[in-house]
Every structure is written in structure tokens, then in C-alpha cells.
């Protein structure tokens, strides 16, 4: 499949100077951060993690954005899981939200904040094993792809 110059530029940005191991780590972290159950901050968090761990910025942001549909699909499950795991604090329901925003906006904001903290807590329990699993799946795949590309290009590791 040919993508022309645009595709070549994207491929170059994603793969430039990145080992398959590091690229697998980049994609795994970007994807897992991408389904963080909050409406803000994943892009900044990915940028910070890429800087901290010297990962590919384009790759981590691409994985982050690819995870967006997963984030939407897991939003409610993470909120429910967080409410079950962390039973402290008030509970958030659709009725409470509807009534709260009409009558007590500040009090409802507290409910949403507590529920979001619980959802992030549930995500923190799920994210590390998912990241490790993604890394273990992606590493051999990307290593194989890298080897195939090196053979096609005639680059056998010689200076």
C-alpha cells in the first residue's frame, strides 16, 4: 500500500531513530494514557511522559489519539468500577447529575470530581497490566517489521 509523500513523512516522523523496543513502549504508553477516564489532559500527560522517558512525541500522540474511541467506550465502566472499588464519598448517578446542575451546581461539581477521582483510581489499577501486555505484544511485531524493512532497504546493520 502506497501513501505517497505524505505517508512517507508520517512514517519517517514515527520511526526516525527509534528502536522497535522503544517504539513498542511509546505506543503502549500512549494508548493506555489515551483511555484515561478524564476529558482533558491526556495529550499533555503523553507529551510529558515522552519527554521524561525520551520517547517519540509523534508516536505517543498518535497512539493517544487512536485510543480515543476506547476512552469513550470505557468512560462509564471506569466510573462504575471506581464507585465499586472505592466506596467512600458520595455516589454519582444520572438523576443526581440532572437535579444537581439545575439546583446546586457547586455541590454537583464536587460529586463529579469525587467520581472522577474514583474512575482514575480504577484506571490506575487497570493501566499498568494493559501497558505491559501491549508492550509484550507490540515488541515482537515491531521487531519483525523493522527486520523486514531493513532487508528490503538492503540495510544489514553495516556502517
Image (tube, rainbow, N blue to C red):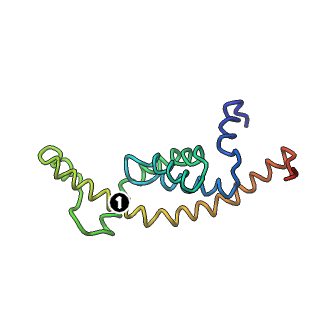
Callout 1 environment at 10 Å: few (<14), some (14 to 19), or many (20+)? many
**Residue sitting at x 27%, y 55%:** 113
Q: Position of residue 153 (x, y in %)?
A: 84, 44
Residue ID at (33%, 58%): 79
Location of residue 14 (image quadrant): top right
Left or right, 116 with respect to 130, comes to left
Residue 86 at x, y = what percent?
Answer: 30, 68
Q: Which residue is mark 1?
A: 119
Identify which residue is drawn at 73% across, 34% down: 2
Q: Image point 71% across, 30% down: which residue?
A: 5
Residue 103 % position (x, y): 11, 46
Q: Residue furthest left?
A: 103
Instruction: Please say if 1 is above or below 57.
Output: above
Q: Quadrant of the N terminus?
A: top right
Closer-to-camera residue (159/39): 159
Measured as percent of width and height from the top left, residue 89 is found at: 22, 65
Question: Is 87 located above or below residue 6 in the figure?
Answer: below
Q: For residue 37, what is the image quadrant?
A: bottom left
| 14 horizontally vs 47: left or right | right
Splitting the image into 4 quarters, where does residue 85 fall? bottom left
Q: At numbered mark 1, what does the secondary structure look like: helix, strand or loop?
A: helix
Amino acid at each position: 500500500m502506497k501513501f505517497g509523500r505524505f505517508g512517507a513523512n508520517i512514517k519517517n516522523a514515527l520511526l526516525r531513530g527509534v528502536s522497535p523496543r522503544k517504539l513498542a513502549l511509546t505506543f503502549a504508553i500512549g494508548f493506555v494514557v489515551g483511555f484515561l477516564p478524564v476529558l482533558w489532559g491526556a495529550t499533555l500527560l503523553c507529551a510529558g511522559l515522552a519527554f521524561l522517558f525520551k520517547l517519540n512525541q509523534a508516536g505517543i500522540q498518535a497512539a493517544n489519539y487512536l485510543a480515543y474511541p476506547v476512552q469513550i467506550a470505557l468512560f462509564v465502566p471506569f466510573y462504575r468500577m471506581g464507585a465499586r472499588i472505592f466506596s467512600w464519598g458520595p455516589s454519582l448517578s444520572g438523576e443526581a447529575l440532572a437535579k444537581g446542575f439545575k439546583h446546586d451546581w457547586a455541590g454537583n461539581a464536587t460529586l463529579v470530581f469525587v467520581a472522577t477521582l474514583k474512575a482514575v483510581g480504577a484506571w490506575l489499577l487497570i493501566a499498568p497490566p494493559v501497558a505491559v501486555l501491549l508492550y509484550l505484544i507490540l515488541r515482537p511485531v515491531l521487531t519483525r517489521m523493522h527486520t523486514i524493512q531493513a532487508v528490503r532497504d538492503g540495510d544489514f546493520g553495516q556502517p
